[in-house]
Amino acid sequence: MGEAGGTLTALEAPTAPSLAEEAEVVQRLRSGDRGALATLYGWYGDRLYRQVILPRLPRIDLAEDVLRDTFRLAVEHITRYEPQNVSIYVWLRRIAINRAMDVHRADGRDRRLREAAAREPERTYGTPPPPPDRAVDTAELCDRVRASLGTLHDRYAQALRLRLLEDRDREECAAVMGVTVGNFDVILHRACKAFRQVWDP
């Protein structure tokens, strides 16, 4: 049984491209042929959307964004793709899963912030809004964060800026730093530990 019950997979199986056809499309993408992207999308776009992305991110608007991002990232990193005698779908599926998880986490953070903001008037019981000089406190906090980052190893500081301050997904962070996603996760973990040691709240 496939990821979504097997019916769609069974219908698609007779028209699935061969590894040789996929290799040709990959070569065209590497040479800058954007028409090859349409071919790749035609093969696997609907399957990724229905079987991989929607089950993990059941919001149509966000799922469509993730599908678009999946193919954008695939084109950006196609030179790093190494066939392993399996379909390129396996690689695309991993990109889609990572992106869907990143977007799901970000959407959860946004939702919690919105809910907290909605509850704020009830919790303060009519307390007036914070004074204008609160912005100065925020600016000072940002300066202190930057100063703390400046004491870290360059790679650690870069990982924290990319992932937490710029809110980029793991694939993009890894690409910017020239490492695999797995290596980036290790760097980010160590960076967080190092930051906690130098941060003085």
Image (cartoon, rainbow, N blue to C red):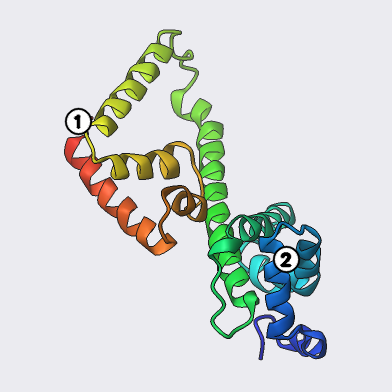
Q: Residue at x 72, y 88 (%)?
A: 6
Q: Does 95 sit left or right of 165 as displayed?
A: right
- Which residue is drawn at the image coordinates 68% and 84% (left, top)? 19
**With respect to residue 91, does 131 lie above or below?**
above
Classify residue 183 as left or right of residue 190. right
| x, y percent for residue 98 | 53, 62
Residue at left 42%, top 61%? 180
- Give above or below for 129 relative to 176: above
Q: CA distance from mark 2 to mark 1?
A: 52 Å
Residue 46, image quadrant: bottom right
Pick the front one: 93 or 62:
93
Question: Which residue lies under the disc numbered 1?
Answer: 200
Crowding at dot 2, Cα within 10 Å, few <14 / some 14-19 / many 20+, comes out as some
Q: Which residue is mark 2?
A: 28
Residue 75 in percent (x, y) is at 65, 58
If the image is split into quadrants, where does the N terminus sit? bottom right
Amino acid under disc 2: Arg
Quadrant in which the C terminus appears: top left
Taking depth in this image into account, of 15 and 81 the one nearest to the observer is 81
Q: Earlier in the sequence, mark 2 or mark 1?
A: 2
